Image: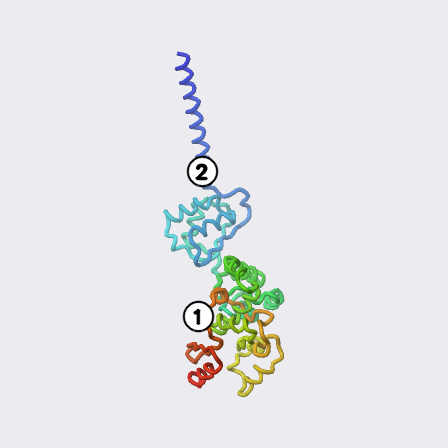
Amino acid sequence: MLIRLFSKKGLTVIGLLCVLAALLVLIYIRMLFNAPDGFFDARSLEITPGMSVKDIALEAQEQGIVRSNLLLYAILTYSYDPTNIFAGTYTFSEPTDVFGVAQKLADQDIENELMRVTIPEGMRLTDIAAIAQNKLPDFDVDEYLIATNKLEGKLFPETYFVPETFTAQDLINLQQKTYEDNVAPLRAAIEASSFTEWEVLILASIIEREANDAESMKMVSGIFQNRLDIGMALQADASIEYVLDTPLGELPEGQLASELRELDSPYNTYLNAGLPPTPIGNPGLMAIKAVLEPTPSDNFYYITDSDGAFYYARTLQEHNANIAKYLR
């Protein structure tokens, strides 16, 4: 009888503990629906094209707008059409529960549209500054050029969607973060190569301007590396253009040959063997990978015809034959 009574009491205690645990879980779940503690000032959530629902939910949690990214993700996924969430800046001026946050996103209640700033691969920092100035009212060209004086090559080219209020420093920070995101996975391959990271950027910036697709970039990369291996000058027109600040095709008639052969500059890769001292622009991922994954060949020369087709040669004699056949 005592054993049976003790068992009933034991079951009663266990039952009470289960109920208490269930209540605590319910309280915790209810808390997750509420706005985070410390939400006193307005907070913004910036959504850019290409962000997944998981990315959006995680960013909302990181910005202190919701307590649980998983809960917001579930609500957006099962209660709304995530493809209807527009890019832009969503401002939350006061604490809002997770349902209100999801509703605001679903309603496309955008505070500010994002500006599209497209920076093409291979572009030099002065041209990047000009593009940004035309797009962003608060962008200071002089501030950008001073701050990026030694960053040519690391200002990653991309189509950026940014707030209209973006400043020069904001753009620099974003470009360098994007550079790090893209280059970090390649660092093991860079370490295994014969180049430093800086040298990879220098060669990639030349390849970016000399070739036009993944195949030609890898082939030109192999040719340049063949030349470097034997101490031959790179003879890249793009490096001359960097110094002249003028496309070679726009030079006055008769000036091209003298500029290529006589210009006293470390960027003259006709006079100087090896790499120039800095990148001549800001290469994209394709050109950087071409340095690390060159196409092996016995070629030392190449030309491009008016249609952008490439012709390769092993010897100077073959090269001159290609010039006579495709460029004259």
Q: Nearer the viewer, mark 2 or mark 1?
A: 1
**Secondary structure at numbered mark 2:** helix
Return the residue at label 1: 213
The kind of residue on which mark 2 rests is Arg
Q: Alpha-carbon neighbours of circle 2 within 10 Å: few (<14), some, or many (≥20)?
A: few
- The residue under the point 58% across, 61% down is 169
Work out whether 50 lies above or below 101.
below
**Secondary structure at numbered mark 1:** loop
- The residue under the point 46% across, 77% down is 314
Q: Report the quarter where the N terminus lies.
A: top left
Q: Do we see residue 305 in this rendering? A: yes
Q: Distance between the residues labelled 2 and 1?
A: 54 Å
* Furthest-top residue in this view: 1
Q: Where is residue 83 in the image (x, y as percent from the top left)?
A: 38, 55
Q: Contact, CB < 8 Å: mark 2 with mark 1?
A: no
Q: Position of residue 283 (x, y in %)?
A: 51, 67
The kind of residue on which mark 1 rests is Asp
Q: Report the quarter where the C terminus lies.
A: bottom left
Return the residue at label 2: 30
